[in-house]
Amino acid sequence: MPVGVTDLSAEIFSLHMTIFWICVVIGLVVFGVMFYSLFKFRRSQGAKSAHFHENTTVEVIWTAVPLLILVGMAVPATATLQKMYDASDAELDVMITGQQWRWRYEYLGEDVAFNSNMSTPRAQIAGEEERGEHYLLEVDEPLVLPINRKVRFLLTADDVIHSWWVPDFAVKQDTIPGFINENWVRINEPGIYRGQCAELCGMDHGFMPIVVHAMEEDDFDDWLAERKEAAEAEAMGVDREWEMAELMERGEQVYGSICASCHQADGGGSPPAFPALAGNQELIDDVDWHTDVVLNGVSGTAMPAFRSNLNPVELAAVVTYSRNAWGNDTGDAVQPAEIVELLE
Amino acid sequence: MWGVIKSVLAAFFGVQKERQRQHDFEHGKPGVFILVGLLMGVVFVVMIAALAIYLAG
């Protein structure tokens, strides 16, 4: 258990150590008395056992002392719990959504949202490459947070229960479909903090790490402004006609971060659960069906709906990419504007 | 009546004198102890709830 980088995590740590030492002292006293008695009053030394039935005074003492110890531990623990539950007066709200198998972060009221996928190459997992320094604990886009500001997390999930856990913040919060849980953090030191999903959520449960990049407040404001601008620029791009090459480039990037974990980078999939896209006749023949699957998912299968997780440009690009990569060569370029119409 | 309440309180705490226990088993009616026990259980819960509400403020 780390001391962590928030006031609250330090408080939880010291609470943990206090209770640990109380347990150590109790253990020493109880076992000390027991072993001393076993040794001192052994039969070979002529000890005779006493026969008596009750001793009200002793019984009252051994009932009252544990009661006082428990209450003594409960008082500071409750005070800390109250602080943990008080998510009021936050300066920044971040919505965290667990998905099989990635995290989505949304800066509420700022129009900035992105998915955070594990970036450890599959070859390292398969043992074909040397493992990197942050094996299984690295992502393509970390959550960026300011230090010295109270940040409220609103946590939920799209599919099954996940749990957002960053030990340095002493935050481990279940994310449950249909519920919104609250938690908060005020980070004291800039740095990179890593965590993992802490609720078994399926095949790639171990492959959806959390990375938080905590920045100085000014740096964070610059970062957020930059991301807002980029989001606005992309929103503007919805209306114009996109070139095939542009769509393919963007699509390859989106495919790599979103689709490849199931359908594989080469489009080969892993049938039967995750069908191949390369050479998939149904996909090649019917662009409308293909677009519908990406937007709305396929009920009863592992294919989720991406209509609210990706923006129109990303959706158009990824459909275009998978219609033209790996020898699919349909020549179809799906435009963001067409996706916007479908989303309405 | 006071004797019954004292016995129930001792039971809450979990310690009772052997002499008192025998006295209760010979003299009291079981129904009275059960009823007083239930009522005092309710009183205890209400007290804890009131304390919590007062402290939460």
Image (cartoon, rainbow, N blue to C red):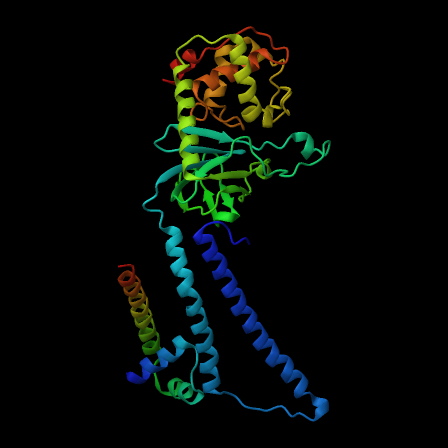
- Say which of A23 and A167 sits in front: A167
**A339 above or below A228?**
above
The image quarter in which residue B53 lies: bottom left
Horizontal arrangement in the rendering, residue A332 relative to residue A83 (left or right): right
Whole-percent x and y of residue A147?
43, 43
Q: Would residue A274 be visible to someone looking at this image?
A: no
Whole-percent x and y of residue A338?
42, 11
**Residue at 41%, 14% in the rendered image:** A238
**A228 above or below A86?**
above
For the N terminus of chain A, give its image quadrant. bottom right
Whole-percent x and y of residue A289?
49, 14
Horizontal arrangement in the rendering, residue A305 relative to residue A278 (left or right): left
- Say which of A254 and B14 sits in front: A254
**Residue at 29%, 84% in the rendered image:** B2
**Residue at 39%, 21% in the rendered image:** A232
- Say which of A317 and A299 sits in front: A317
- Say which of A150 and A203 sits in front: A150
Q: Would residue B53 be visible to someone looking at this image?
A: yes
**A195 above or below A306?**
below
For the C terminus of chain A, give its image quadrant. top left
Horizontal arrangement in the rendering, residue A128 relative to residue A243 (left or right): right
Whole-percent x and y of residue A73?
44, 66
**Residue at 61%, 10% in the rendered image:** A328
The image quarter in which residue A35 lies: bottom right
**A117 above or below A244?**
below
